[in-house]
Image (cartoon, rainbow, N blue to C red):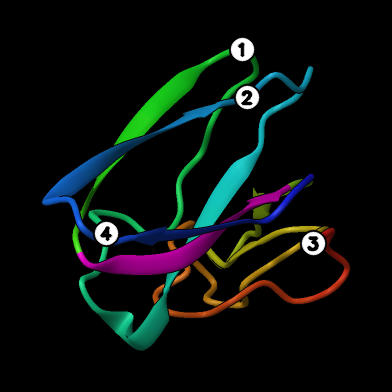
Amino acid sequence: MMHIYMNIAGAQSARITFTNNCPYTIWPGTLTANQKPQLATTGFELASKVSTSLDAQAPWKGRFWARTGCSTDASGRFSCATADCASGQVTCNGNGAIPPHLW
């Protein structure tokens, strides 16, 4: 797993494509610096060998990380074994990753 930091400036927008080359599902999390402009989602499921894209409006600064071992318990609370953001949902809603994670 890796955290990716991005700073989009000087352009009007950028398309960010995520590709999961792992042999298992990951749940990327996103965190926007200063909470603006926010991306369309702050977390999502990404199956093995699948790609998806997000558009970011300039100026945008933030980071992405992969969460693993995620599931939803009987009460509906979502959590991950690594890099959980403790929101209780697939989306991180402004929360960053909690160790253990790889930077």
Q: Going by the image, does 30 lie left or right of 82? A: left
The local secondary structure at tag 4 comes to loop
Sequence-earlier tag: 4 or 3: 4
Mark on residue 49? 1
Q: Nearer the viewer, residue 41 or 87?
A: 41
Q: Residue 39 bears which disc, if any? A: 4
Task: Mark 1 vs mark 3: give the one in front.
Answer: 3
Query: Residue drawn at (62%, 60%), measured in percent from left and top?
Result: 74
| Span colored in magenta | 59-67
Kindly check if marks 1 and 2 are in contact, taking CB atoms under 8 A apart as contact. Answer: yes
- Front position in the image: 42 or 64: 64
**How far apart are labels 1 and 3 at the CA level?**
22 Å
For badge 2, the amino acid type reads Asn
The percent position of residue 58, horizontal first and vertical second, equals 19, 61
Under tag 3, what secondary structure? loop
Query: Which residue lies under the disc numbered 3?
Result: 103
Q: Nearer the viewer, mark 3 or mark 2?
A: 3
Amino acid on which the number 3 mark rests in the picture: Trp
Instruction: Tell which residue pokes out farthest to the bottom in this image.
Output: 34
Q: Nearer the viewer, mark 4 or mark 3?
A: 3
Q: Quadrant of the C terminus?
A: bottom right
What residue would you read off at disc 2? 20
Q: Amino acid at mark 4?
A: Leu
Pointer 4 and pointer 1: residues touching (CB < 8 Å)?
Answer: no
Q: Position of residue 48 (x, y in %)?
A: 65, 18
Q: Residue 42, how many percent across, how many down?
A: 39, 61
51 above or below 42?
above
- CA gap, disc 3 and disc 2: 17 Å
